[in-house]
Image (cartoon, coloured by chain):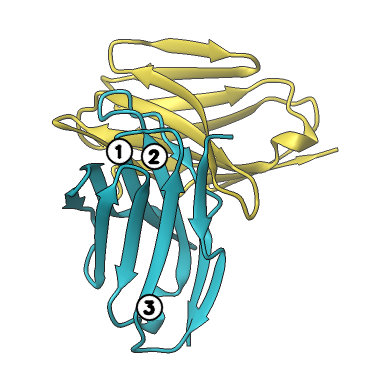
Amino acid sequence: DAGITQSPRHKVTETGTPVTLRCHQTENHRYMYWYRQDPGHGLRLIHYSYGVKDTDKGEVSDGYSVSRSKTEDFLLTLESATSSQTSVYFCAISESGLINEQFFGPGTRLTVL
Amino acid sequence: SQQGEEDPQALSIQEGENATMNCSYKTSINNLQWYRQNSGRGLVHLILIRSNEREKHSGRLRVTLDTSKKSSSLLITASRAADTASYFCATDRGGSYIPTFGRGTSLIVHP
C-alpha cells in the first residue's frame, strides 16, 4: 500500500464545532486531494493541492478549507460542521497532474450530530 | 456534475462468469481510469487508459475505450468471489488532469 494515512479514522462531533482531518503521505507525491463519499453520489472532489501552499477548489468546496504547509501533510477543515457534512472522507495522492493515477487513504468516517 | 457515469448500478453474477461494466462520459478526456473499492476501504487503482488507446489488459481485466462514443468498458473475466466490490471510473476533463469519479457499479460475485 502507498504510504498514506488519515487521522482520525472515526469522529463524532456536534453541529457548529470546527473539525480538522489530516492526511499524511510518505511518498513525496506532489498532488493531494480530499474527496467525500456519500451514497448515491460516488466520490466528489472537495479540494486539491498541487504543491506546498498551492490549493484549488473542487466541485463541493463550500464549507471546507484546506491547508498544505508541508509536502507530506494536507489538512481539511470544516470551520463549523453541519449535519450535511456527515460523510466518509478520503484523501488521495498522485505523483503529478499528468501521471494522475491516485492512491487512496483508508478514509475517515465523520458524523455530525 | 458527474463527468463519468457507470452502468449498471449493480451487477450480480456467479463465480466463473465474466462481468462487464460500462462508463459513459460527457466531455473530451486525456485519460480514463478504473478503480475498485472493497467495502469499508479506500479505492484501489486498477488500470489507466489514455485517450489515444483503444484497449488495455491487466491480468483478468480488459478495458476498452471508444472516444467517438465517449464510453469505456471494464471486463473482468472468470470472476471470483474476491472480485466482489464497487468499481468506479474516473475521467478528467480535457483541459484539466484532475480526475472526477462516477457513482460506481456494485459487483457481487456469488461463490
Q: Which mark is residue A31?
A: 1
Q: Residue A57, image x and y in percent?
A: 19, 54
Classed neighbour count for the residue bearing mark 3: other residues with Cα under 10 Å, few (<14), some (14–19), many (≥20): few
Rendered image quadrant of residue B24: top left
Q: In front here: A85 or A92?
A: A92
Q: Which mark is residue A84?
A: 3
In the rendered image of this protein, does residue A45 appear above or below residue A72? below
Q: In front here: B68 or A10?
A: A10
Mark 1 or 3, nearer chain start? 1
Mark 2 vs mark 3, CA separation in Å: 25 Å
Q: At numbered mark 1, what does the secondary structure look like: helix, strand or loop?
A: strand
Rendered image quadrant of residue A98: top left
| Residue A55 placement, left or right of A21 | left
Q: Is residue A60 visible?
A: no
| Residue B2 placement, left or right of B64 | left
**Residue drawn at point x = 17 percent, y = 29 percent:** B94
Mark 1 vs mark 2, CA separation in Å: 5 Å
Q: At numbered mark 3, what does the secondary structure look like: helix, strand or loop?
A: helix
Instruction: Indicate the quadrant containing the N terminus of chain A: top left, top right, bottom left or bottom right.
Output: top right
- Amino acid type for the residue under numbered disc 2: Ile
Q: Colour of chain A?
A: cyan
Find disc 2 in the rendering and name its residue.
A93
Tell me, yes or no, whether the two marked residues, 1 and 2, touch with CB atoms within 8 Å: yes
